[in-house]
Amino acid sequence: MRVLAVDTTTERGSVAVTEDDGVRGEVRLASSEGHSRRLLPAVDFLLQSLGLRPGDIEAYAVTTGPGSFTGLRVGLSTVQGLALGAGRPCLGMSALDVLAARIAGAAPASVALMDAYRGEVYGAVYDGEGGPVGRASVGRPEALIARTPAVTAFVGDGAERHRELILSLRPRALFPPRSLFLAGTLGRLAAPRLKRGEGVAPAELRPLYLREPDIRRPAP
């Protein structure tokens, strides 16, 4: 199955086309200015580079969160529009699940951490094969680390930011070097599920926020 995968949950945005469990091409966009102006041109560039038309895509995958509120809206709305126009199914996946899959097998347990700012992280604990252990949450990293065994692998920009803290609490922690651009892995994970008929209509995609938007009222 040929899948177009999109990740815009962080500043490291990416778009990939996967087919037969392999990545045919991927465009990576590291930018602090958001993805609204770059995402569709990146999709167009990738398809043209691979000699594909929009109609050649059989399904779409997108990371639904957690992450940047603006980034999530851009990624979800773009995939919804493309899939609706082509009449193709979609699959949304947690960015934390995709991160965990990148280090499956590295340790008896793993943790995916994304920087949530304010000294907090979005995070989830997984078993050695990347299966979730409990629910994803947002909070202080210390609370999540306390739920992990002595030998645990950590991945994500939250793990990078809080590396010293993690090592102070878990001296045997592992940090497998992995790229944090997720679209290629997302597409490969989504393909078998889409083949099994787990795809949904574009309108059924929902964001995974974990935290309410920070809406500030103007001063009187």
Image (tube, grey):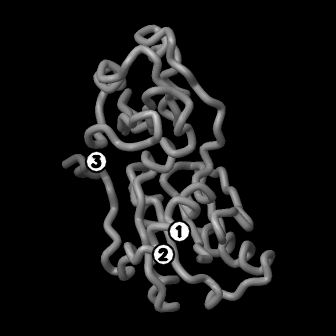
Q: Which mark is residue 210?
A: 3
In the rendered image, is residue 33 in sight?
Answer: no
The image shows residue 113, relative to residue 215, as above or below, that is: above
Q: Assess whether mark 2 and mark 1 are in contact (beta carbons under 8 angstroms).
A: yes
Across and down, in percent, residue 98 comes to 49, 50
Q: Nearer the viewer, residue 151 or 209?
A: 151
Write down the residue under mark 2. Answer: 195
Whole-angstrom CA distance, mark 1 to mark 2, is: 6 Å
Q: Which mark is residue 100?
A: none
Residue ID at (36%, 34%): 125
Kind of residue sitting beneath label 2: Lys
Marks 3 and 2: which is nearer the front? Answer: 2
Judged left or right of residue 179, residue 199 is left
Element at label 2: helix
Marks 1 and 3: which is nearer the front? Answer: 1
**Disc with the residue nearer the chain's start (1 vs 3):** 1
Across and down, in percent, residue 192 comes to 50, 67
Element at label 3: loop
Whole-angstrom CA distance, mark 3 to mark 2, is: 29 Å
Q: Quadrant of residue 57?
A: bottom right
- Outermost residue on the left side: it is 220
Write down the residue under mark 1. Answer: 191
Q: Nearer the viewer, residue 117 or 202?
A: 202
Dot 1, crowdedness within 10 Å: few (<14), some or many (≥20)?
many
Residue ID at (73%, 66%): 25
